[in-house]
Image (cartoon, rainbow, N blue to C red):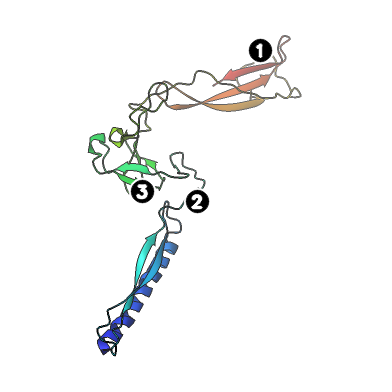
Amino acid sequence: MSLYGALFAGVSALSAQSQAMGMISDNIANVNTIGYKRSEAAFSSLITAQTRSTAYAPGAVRASTQQRIDQQGIIQQSRSTTDLALSGNGFFVVSDSAESSDLTEPSYTRAGAFTEDQQGYLVNTAGKYLMGWPLDANGNVPGASADISSLVPINVAFLGGVTRPTTQAEIALNLDENETPYIYPLSGTESSHFSRTMRVYDTLGEAQDMTFRFYRHSSPTSTMAGSVD
């Protein structure tokens, strides 16, 4: 055995251990990275051929990376209404461009942290656009859902999508009859005894907050009246 062979075996061990420590460091550094899958080191020995029975040819060791991309991540609560999560198998399809015709080499990710850009498209932290199938007027997925070439960028600004304005709403409440009544008729400056806000959507898909205000007054036919803002 030459001195060079002994040194090479020792250096390979240091290199393999260095790679393993680097994987551990990356796992710790990305503990809060959305969609990150941890990496693990798998060591394997390098065996050399023995040319003579009286001479030993030293081998070495190497570290190969095993990425746990097939493991289910922890689903965490988010305050963003555009964040998504996958439970089970599947990937999000993302594209570098907002043009559906440019979906020649799509990318796949499990990270569901998406935000709305200035044009209403959903993009992730890498700037890639989330792709999906447009629904028909009845909210059904088209029949060509098995072909990713029919995917289009998801736009949540309702610029070209199907919007459904609010047509029906229901509210359930209890009113306190012990409230001090106002003198009827009301002047319009009184503070309401009870109020409740409900979110509705107009024909453009924009959210509107509708407030119901209730007043108790001394009318002989009705003890409670309401108004809607």
Quote the CA–CA distance across marks 3 and 2: 19 Å
Kind of element beneath mark 2: loop
Q: Which mark is residue 125?
A: 3
Above or below, comparing residue 212 to residue 155 in the picture = above
Q: Residue 185 carries which label?
A: 1
Q: What residue type is labelled 1?
A: Pro
Kind of element beneath mark 1: loop
Q: Which residue lies furthest to the front in this view?
A: 53
Above or below, comparing residue 37 to residue 52 in the picture = above
State the image quarter where residue 56 is shown: bottom left
Image location of residue 29, percent across then percent down: 42, 62
Q: Is residue 97 left or right of residue 109?
A: left
* Numbered disc in front, either 3 or 2: 2
Image location of residue 214, percent across then percent down: 64, 21
Q: Considering only order in the chain, which callout, 2 or 3, is on the residue closer to the N terminus?
A: 2
Residue found at x 25% / y 39% = 103
Q: Mark 2 points at which residue?
A: 74
Above or below, comparing residue 215 to residue 67 in the picture = above
Above or below, comparing residue 121 to residue 198 in the picture = below
Q: Which of 56 and 27 is in front in this view?
A: 56
Q: Residues within 10 Å of mark 2 (few under 14, many from 20)?
A: few
